[in-house]
Structures are given as structure tokens and as C-alpha cells.
Image (spheres, rainbow, N blue to C red):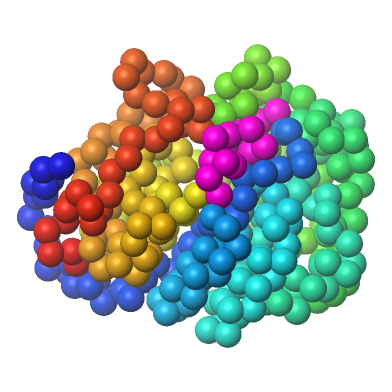
Amino acid sequence: MAEFQLSKISNIPLKHARILRGPHQWAFDLTNKCNFRCLHCFNRSGENYIMKEELKDNEVLKFIKDVVKMKPFNFCFCGGEPLLRKDVLCKSARILSEVDSMVSLVTNGSLVTNKIAKELFESGVNNVQISLDGAKAETHERLRQYKGSFELAVRAISHFREVGVKDISIAFTPTSFNCREFEETFYLVRKLDVSEIRAQPIMILGRTQLHLEELLPTPLQYRELVKTITLLQEKCGPGIIEWGDPVDHLIRFRTLAKHCVNMVDIRANGDIIPSPYLPLTVGNIRRHSISEYWDAGLVRIWELPVVKEFAEKIQSVLDFGKKEEGTPTVWFDKNIKLDIIDDNLFKGGN
């Protein structure tokens, strides 16, 4: 593939890119296998094609050993349900904790016992996010499609707190049938002493596209939810509720931060992606090590016109659901495959 012609950049961001030995923030799908079939799952965990290509345990550990050379600030194990691969997760966490990295885990909580929570904590997992999508079992389980999942999530919070995990957050996905329960959910998890509750507009990706009529809140419901969040923030103080924007990084990375992006996403099959919301792959750690990709220009991946072109198509969460002829549908079709090194996308790397 011909080399992309990049515009000239200022000396300041280029200098910063060269100083960074590696990303500060990492998100790694340890597996896309899952014991749930949540109606809104953006990457179709339990059903997508990535499951057939996942890294083996020895490949995961080889990757982690390369990562620690880059001294990450935070490394997050995502999924799927990462605890389906608990043993390699714990081995990886021990390696990461040796360089004082924060080790984070995103889980549905269903497999967490006090013993497993203790094992995770002692392995180095010190930041946990658990999904809780309502104040009542029927609401949470309508979205999660797993009987008993509400009680299991609540118990998981308690188990992690009991063994010493201090940073426990809750992810709440707004839907047409749970927005009114946000305040009640907030007070429930505050009693459980969670550090933060996070919410953002539902992403029209993956299985959400198949259940859109049932799931998508109305504009009025969103306005009422944001009003509730604002009032709770005024009452309880800042820092407890985070209202996120899934589109934010697609705008920020292609504009203000395009010359020096200090985070990276890795799929369960080793694919390196600029964003899990774009149908584009820029390398695979089975072909080259992550440190080689970083040195070859991964830090500047958002300078590439093809990355910016895909990102520019998404201006709001509603754009996630738009389909374009000739463009893969993320998490349904296989990504467009590029490789920073093999395709010589950046002449001279950093």
C-alpha cells in the first residue's frame, strides 16, 4: 500500500510523541466470550467472529510482558466477560503490578465470589467496574438477559469491597425502561460505598441495532436523566457521577490530540484498533510486538487520513447506527485491515 501523505506538524506535539515510551491508557479485550447476551452489547460478545480467533494464554502473557516495558499507567481488562479467563487474567495482573501499573477490570459481576475477588485483588487488580442498570432486578435483568444477575452484581460489589478494592465504579446504561430508576440506583450503590457511577448515551452498535425500538430513550427521557444527574451532582458534590460522551474521543483524537494519542485498544484476537467504534484495524500483535508498532507511529495513528475520514462520519451517537454501502458494519463484518509496519504507513515512525 502506498504511504499516506501526512501534513506537516508542529515541533511541540512531535516532541511529545517521541518522548512517550508507550501509551498511558490501555484497553484490552481479554475475551469476547460471555455468559450474558445483553440486549445492548456494542461488540456482540458471545456471538462475534473475534471469538474464533482469540489470543491463546501464552500469546496474552507474551503481549503483557511487552506492555510492561512501556510502563503503562492504567491497563484495563475488558470483554466479553474477562473472568471467563480468570487464570491468565491473574497472571497478567501480577506482571503489570510489578511495574506499579493500575490494573482495571470491567465485569458483569456474575462470576465473582469472595474467593475470586480476593485472588484478583492479591494479583494486582485494584480498579473494578461492574454493570448495574437499574434499582430493581426486573429492570437490570431485562437488559442483561440473565436471571439472577442483579443480585450477583450487588454481591460482587460487596465482595470486592470486603477484600480491599477501593476503586469500585458502576456502569449504568440508559434505556427507555430504566432512565427513571437512575436516582434510585444512585442511592443504592452509594450505600454499597462505590466510588463512582458512570453513564453515557446508549451506543447504536452491535446488538443495540437489533433491539433499537425497545432500548433507545426518547429525547425527553435523556433530558430528564441529565436533569436528574445535575441535581444529584449539586446535592452530593462533583466526582461521584460521570456523564460520558462516547463520541468525544472520535472528535478530540482527530483534532486536538491527533499527533500524540496516549491510549491504545487491543481486540481479543490481537488486532490494534484506533477505536472500537470504527471498522478499521491498523496492526496485529501476532505479526509484530506492540512496542514495534508504537515505535513505527502508533502514537500518531490519528494523523492518518483514513482514520480521520471514518471518525468524521460520527458527530453524535445516532451516527453509530448509520450504514454505508461498501463500509463494514462494526462488530458484524470484518474490519478493513491496514498495518502500520507492513504497509509502511509512517515513514520513519516517530
Which residue occupies the foreground of this view, 58 or 202? 58
Quarter holding residue 43: top right
Residue ID at (62%, 19%): 210
Number of numbered discs present? 0
Residue 157 percent across, percent down from the top left: 83, 59
Above or below, 75 against 154 in this view is below
Q: Which residues are magenta?
A: 39-54
Give residue 16's quadrant in the image: bottom left
Q: Is residue 317 above or below residue 109?
A: above
Q: Residue at x 47, y 43 (%)?
A: 276
- Nearest the eye: 224 or 316: 316
User: Is 320 in the magenta?
Assistant: no
Instruction: Specify whether residue 306 is in view.
Output: yes
Residue 127: horizontal and vertical position, in percent?
67, 67
Which residue is pictured at 34% across the width and 69% down the height?
A: 291
Instruction: Please indicate whether residue 274 sits to the left or right of residue 97 in the image.
Output: left
- Left/right placement of residue 93 relative to residue 308 reads right
Q: Is residue 253 above or below residue 114?
A: above
The residue sitting at 61% across, 26% down in the picture is 208
Tell me residue 161's x, y (percent). 83, 69
Q: Quadrant of the N terminus?
A: top left
Q: For this view, does 224 lie left or right of residue 21?
A: right
